[in-house]
Image (tube, rainbow, N blue to C red):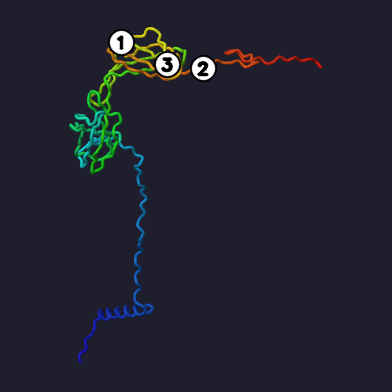
Amino acid sequence: MHRRRRSPANLLAAAAVAGLVAGTACLSGNEFEPLVPPTTSSTLPTNTTVAVDYSTVPLAAVPGTTTTAPVVVGPGPATLAGRVDGPDGPVAGAVVRAERLVGDEVASVDVVAGEDGTWTVAGVLGGRYRVRAWRQPDLATVEPQLLFVGAGGTDGVVVTVERFPPLVIDTAVAPDPPTVGERTSLRVRVATQEVDGEGVVVAVPRPAVPVSVQPGTGWALEPPPAAVTDEAGNVTFVLVCRMPGPQMLTVTLGSGEVLPITPPDCQPPAPPETAVPGDTTVPGGPGPSPPATSTTAP
């Protein structure tokens, strides 16, 4: 058999491999030590930034205006209806004003009553209403009707008007009440009154009107018994009451109107003051003097 001869280089390489295997087997009987994993942290970095407080930062004003919706009567689902009554029954042609009240705001609508005094305001909104009526120049409502109108409406609202005569005379006395035996001033005021286009009763003084006074048996009239009203419609007379109780007067105008007047009842005079026996007090003077005393030495 033919044998291959190994070269010196091959022999050296085989010897190196055998030494490496033998060294590995001598490592305490274990394989290679495991690698230690790198250290990691699961904690996120802390944010040290502080939030800015903008609550104290003033804001610049924005130019503009505040607007609110105006108060209106309608359109709405309700109907408001009724009748106008006066001193002689239903009032034809009276103006009826229905005012819708929302807080301090007011919206109104006017209608005219028919021949039978009835009136209707259709298509209004619900809420609080004030209703009054008038007819120029002598009829007007003194106390308006206050009511609440629901979604179904309201009917049967009776609005009452009163008659205001074209001429009015009022009087005043001083002192009030008058006293028997003392002078009393009687002021008479003459004015013309009428209902204006807004249902308001307006009184206008009447100057230069002749006025005379006819006293009853309970009064004594100082002259002159007649005078003429001034620019304010006033004229003043002086009388003396003769007896206590109600005493009648009569005022006559130059145009012929005669009006009875009932002033406040006359009061009896105050009783005179009577002196108490032993009282040396003088009415209106200083008080009584103390009794005199004397002293003697023991």
Task: Name the amino acid, label 3.
Answer: Ala
Quadrant in which residue 9 is drawn: bottom left
Residue depicted at x 22% and y 26%: 135
Quickly name the residue at label 1: 210
Q: Is residue 252 above or below residue 74?
A: above
Quickly name the residue at label 3: 174
Task: Name the amino acid, label 1.
Answer: Pro
Residue depicted at x 39% and y 14%: 216
Q: Nearer the viewer, mark 3 or mark 1?
A: 1
In the rendered structure, find residue 270 and report the number of the disc placed on it. Answer: 2
Label 2 Cα crowd, 10 Å radius (few <14 / some 14-19 / many 20+): few
Classify residue 91 as left or right of residue 28.
left
Q: Are marks 3 and 2 in contact (CB under 8 Å)?
A: no
Sequence-wise, the earlier of marks 1 and 2 is 1
Considering depth in this image, is 24 or 122 the residue closer to the camera? 122
Q: Secondary structure at mark 2?
A: loop
User: Residue 215 placed where, x, y %?
Assistant: 38, 13
Q: Secondary structure at mark 3?
A: strand
Mark 3 vs mark 1, CA separation in Å? 22 Å
Sequence-wise, the earlier of marks 3 and 1 is 3
